[in-house]
Image: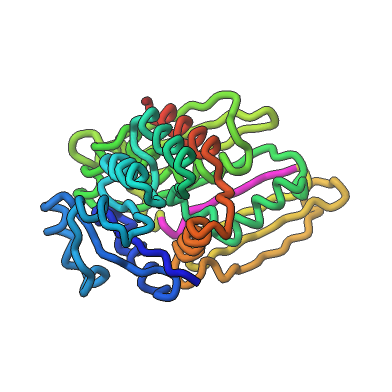
Amino acid sequence: MKKLRVAHYGIAHDHSVFAMQMLRRYPDVFEIVGVCEPDETARRVFGGKDEYAGLPWLTEDEVLTREDIDAAFCEGFELRSVSDAQKCLDRGLHVHLDKPGGTDLAAFRRLLDTAAEKHLTFQMGYMYRWNPAMQYVRRAVRSGALGTITGIDATFSVQYNEEKKNWLRQFPGGMLFFLGCHSLDMIYQLLGQPLSAQAWNRSSGFADGGALDSCLAVLDYPNGAATIRSSGVEPNGYADRMLKVVGTKGTVKIQPLETPTVMRVSWAKDGESDPYYDYSTGVFPGFLPGRYDAMFLDFAAMARGELENPWTAEYEYGLQKLLLELCGQ
């Protein structure tokens, strides 16, 4: 198997170090040509981490001109990374872009169009698409096993310190844009485009400058509603992250979403209501050694032409458009 020769382009994203851990875990799949961070401040702040030790540092020009690079993992500042990704696609590199895809919908559309025109792999970094429990739910919904879906509730929260809460101010929609986008992706996978959607992005008052660290979004579908809650001030928010999918034939609840992934399935018995349920609970092994492994291994397979990207350009565009609308863009 030919190794995919990659450049790690940008290191300021929260996921950057985890992405690098994954790349280094599979030396038979990935050859890391080097790391690039055009922003000197970001390189000074983040570049000393162990994950980057011993790797060559590349200039931006080297990433975009060297012939021994096949792909780029764009893990820079969230509001710069779309521009980074466009440069890489223009150069003819396959691109993994960490979520959430920037604030300029036209620029995001251009990414998708360039990848299609050049027959390049373009992957968004929504790693929960590869969560085994989420894959189970996706199959159960699409096969009709859960019946008609009448409601979805999703929670994706964390407890940020003051510095991080203030950092949220740069994003329209705050928590919904940066973390709630994962919940939106889960719902969009299952139900697609809603009839209408509205978000309430608010400041809890515990951060300077009115950072939008508390959100509620409601998406209206023909047979029910889906809700998203995302908070940056929730104690134990990580462990309480949750997805609940309610259907006429069964309900699935995943909580926590990972480490470990725990899923409870409740099947309706002969169409009866409570208390006639058959409960089954499963603890999934979760992701491979890391939460990004399966996603990146699929990226390599797609770049080698061995796998078709299951996430179409139209899916990615529709998701990004809906996210920006909910964030007031």
- Residue 246 on the magenta span: yes
Q: Nearer the viewer, residue 30 or 276?
A: 30
Q: Locate residue 157, reporting x and y percent.
A: 41, 49
Predominant secondary structure in magenta?
strand
Q: Residue furthest right?
A: 270
Instruction: For the C terminus, give its image quadrant.
Output: top left
Q: Nearer the viewer, residue 31 or 327?
A: 31
Q: Is residue 233 visible?
A: yes
Q: Locate residue 253, reporting x and y percent.
A: 62, 54
Q: Nearer the viewer, residue 119 or 74?
A: 119
Tell me which residue sits at (16%, 53%) in the image.
42
What span is in magenta? 238-247
Location of residue 247 (image quadrant):
top right
- In the rendered structure, the answer to whether residue 222 lies left or right of residue 51 reads right
- Residue 47 on the magenta span: no
Tell me which residue sits at (78%, 59%) in the image.
278
Q: Nearer the viewer, residue 271 or 222?
A: 222
Position of 276 relative to 82 (above/below): below
- In the rendered structure, the answer to whether residue 99 lies left or right of residue 192 reads left
Tell me which residue sits at (33%, 59%) in the image.
69
